[in-house]
Image: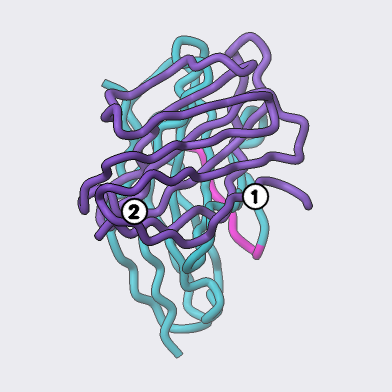
Chain colours: A purple, B cyan
């Protein structure tokens, strides 16, 4: 595997289900990101982890819960979602120094989530 | 507030014609600029980037962009497009030291190449 991988690629879930999205980066990076991409809207940054610590949480509802067990893996745990949460969820990674980097981000293919 | 503007939500163009996709950003002391492309059902792929040096940057697939500091713009161009260039294009900006790791994305421009 190379680059950034995401599983599953597609997910359909009911509002009462619990599911998790997985992201893995094979680039040796130390920062990882979750973005939400909805139709007709700009990319929304949800969470940022640097050196396995959460450094940003952009007012994301608590029904989304991130987890970063190590610098290569990032999860997004989903619980009691709403239909408006249906979107493409993108994971990205980058190499950060002391946060003063140019932040070229490398993206995974995304998980297309549909909430019924 | 820091912002990135892509005024054109969709740009239709005929195959082999030239195209320019516009990107403007809010003024800042230092900026680092990126263009990403997203093909259907895929993630974002880096097309090109400006970090420093020459203001004309060449990227993959024949695309280029020019950094214009006075106009706070970073427009993407290609002299002759192909059907396969049909995709969504995103401009993104790192506003430098004060913004650390964050990339601000524009809302995207859908390039539609017609035969």
- Helix, strand or loop at mark 2: strand
Q: Are marks 1 and 2 on the same chain?
A: yes
Letter of the chain that mark 1 sits on in the rendering: A
- Helix, strand or loop at mark 1: strand
Q: Is residue A45 magenta?
A: no
From the image, tell me which residue sits under label 1: A5
Question: Which residue is at the front of the view, A63 or B43?
Answer: A63
Q: Residues within 10 Å of mark 2 (few under 14, many from 20)?
A: some
User: Whole-Å distance between the Cαs marked 1 and 2?
Assistant: 18 Å
User: Which residue is rendered at x = 48% and y = 43% of the image?
Assistant: A20
Q: Is residue A97 left or right of residue A34?
A: right
Q: Earlier in the sequence, mark 1 or mark 2?
A: 1
Vertical position of residue A113 compared to residue B102: above or below: below
**Image position, residue B3 (x, y; %):** 31, 31
**Image position, residue B115 (x, y; %):** 45, 90
Q: Which mark is residue A87?
A: 2
Q: Which residues are magenta?
A: B61-68
């Amino acid at each position: 595997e190379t680059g950034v991988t995401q599983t599953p690629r597609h997910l359909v879930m009911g509002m009462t289900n619990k599911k998790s999205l997985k992201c893995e980066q094979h680039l040796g990076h130390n920062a990882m990101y979750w973005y939400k991409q909805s139709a007709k809207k700009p990319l929304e940054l949800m969470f940022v982890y640097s050196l396995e610590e959460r450094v940003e949480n952009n007012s994301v509802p608590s029904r989304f819960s991130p987890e970063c067990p190590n610098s290569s893996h990032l999860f997004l745990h989903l619980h009691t979602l709403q239909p408006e949460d249906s979107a493409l969820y993108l994971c990205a990674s980058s190499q950060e120094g002391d946060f003063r980097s140019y932040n070229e981000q490398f993206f995974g293919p995304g998980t297309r989530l549909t909430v019924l | 507030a820091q912002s990135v503007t892509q005024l054109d939500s969709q740009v239709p163009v005929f195959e082999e014609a030239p195209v320019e996709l516009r990107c403007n950003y809010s003024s800042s002391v230092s900026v680092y600029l990126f263009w990403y492309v997203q093909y259907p059902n895929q993630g974002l792929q880096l097309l090109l980037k400006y970090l420093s040096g020459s203001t004309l940057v060449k990227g993959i697939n024949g695309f280029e962009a020019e950094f214009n500091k006075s106009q706070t713009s970073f427009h993407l161009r290609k002299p002759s497009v192909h059907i396969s260039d049909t995709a969504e294009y995103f401009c993104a900006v790192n506003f430098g030291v004060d913004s650390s790791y964050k990339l601000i994305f524009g809302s995207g421009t859908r390039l539609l190449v017609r035969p």
